[in-house]
Image: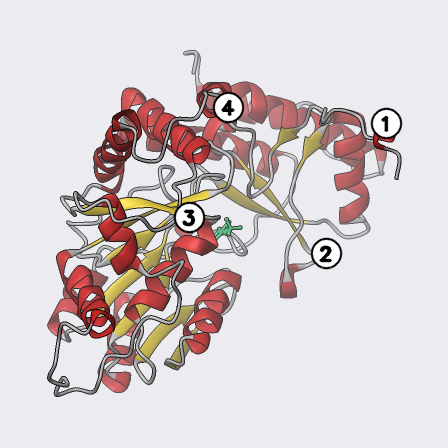
Amino acid sequence: MDIHDYAQINPPQRLLMGPGPINADPRVLRAMSSQLVGQYDPAMTHYMNEVMALYRALFRTENRWTMLIDGTSRAGIEAVLVSSIRPGDKVLVPVYGRFGHLLCEIARRCRAEVHIIEVPWGEVFTPDQIEDAIKRVRPRLLLTVQGDTSTTMLQPLEQLGAICKQYGVLFYTDATASFAGNPLETDAWGLDAVSVGMQKCLGGPSGTSPITLSPQMEAVIRRRKCVEAGIRTEAHQDGEDEMIWSNYFDLGMIMDYWGPERLNHHTEATSALFGARECARLILQEGLDNTIARHQLHGEAMLHGIQAMGLEIFGDVKNKMSNVLGVIIPDGINGDRVRKLMLDDFGIEIGTSFGPLHGKVWRIGTMGYNARKDCVMQTLTALEAVLHHLGFRSPQGAALQAAWDRYGNGSH
Ligand SMILES: *Cc1c(COP(=O)(O)O)cnc(C)c1O
């Protein structure tokens, strides 16, 4: 190896219009390039407390335990599941896409008894379907995905909290893809735990995962920590609570690090925390409702533009996330060829799909920093040109006109 062959990192300029990651807001990148401070510097612990307050506002919760898990979104998911699921616990997972299967897989590693209900990809569950399954299975936890990027669907959650409460079920959702682009009300909807990630509507790079835990969830986790610390002596009636097998994802220890005890655990990923703080600050300055409305506006403009091109949308449009669109690849068109031309000739990335949708559906995102009019217009222009180039005939200019119509005369 000759070190002189290695140039300084200088990635190509891309417009990331896939299902995530997306381009980070430059202000977030600037925050992340700030110099480090010590782990227990008063400035650092102050920033940690600020991050807790900022994310409480974004999660719409009073939950004390609202903090970051170092690692990508999957780290947040795993921390919640590993810390709350005891071996043998029954969990119910409504699966409507790839990320539901991920929850099952992690729950099985936690040695849960995993029960699944499924709907075809492109659909979501009714509250009745979930309630019926809860009555039948009697799970300890309900594990849901709010927005499954693999299908672009948004599972309605607002009625599930009351059902969970009635049957004594802990209620978790992975809101990574939907958060800040679609409404989520942690307290009003009765959620016990929510985890998200940075690289979707929050507008940052992946690498840290904000989570929030209800007091009930905290109690469940603390009980397991007590076993480890040898504080609790009698066995519980409903079975011995085993110690959490992961040190890194032990939320009891992570709470003691983020709380006033400041017990040393990991070294908080400082630059990632600076980025997460800036993402939240920018959204709250815009106003969370305005951020959600912005995702709706640009998502709809993209949708109208795509439809005007004569392309079909995948899945039930009325249950779609605002920020990702599944576009059915027309007959006779090679989906990967289109993506390559978009990338090579326009510098625009759109997404492919997984599993049963691979080769059949593109996924186009309008999220975070890229939920903007110019990004929508550029993507529609490029896609129309590429499709035309490959022989797909659509009325030229119709996509842009339809998007403009959605925007109206005002400027957005
Ligand atoms: C994108 C996405 C993730 C991503 O997880 P990472 O660990 O950040 O790659 C998780 N869950 C859902 C629903 C997603 O859409």
* Nearest to N terminus: mark 3 or mark 4: 4
* Nearest to N terminus: mark 1 or mark 4: 1
* Nearest to N terminus: mark 3 or mark 2: 3
Q: Which residue was labeled with disc 3?
A: 176
Q: Is residue 148 visible?
A: no
Closer to the eye: label 1 or 3? 1
* Nearest to N terminus: mark 4 or mark 2: 4
Amino acid identity at mark 1: His
How far, Cα to Cα, is label 4 from label 2?
A: 34 Å
Amino acid identity at mark 4: Leu
Quarter where residue 145 is shown: bottom left
On screen, 25 above or below 226?
Answer: above
Left or right of 350 on screen, residue 181: left
Residue 325 or residue 33, whichever sits in front: 33
Q: Which residue was labeled with disc 4?
A: 29
Residue 198: x and y in percent read: 44, 39
Residue 223 or residue 215, whichever sits in front: 223
Q: Which residue was labeled with disc 2?
A: 359
Amino acid identity at mark 2: Gly
Q: Which residue was labeled with disc 1?
A: 4
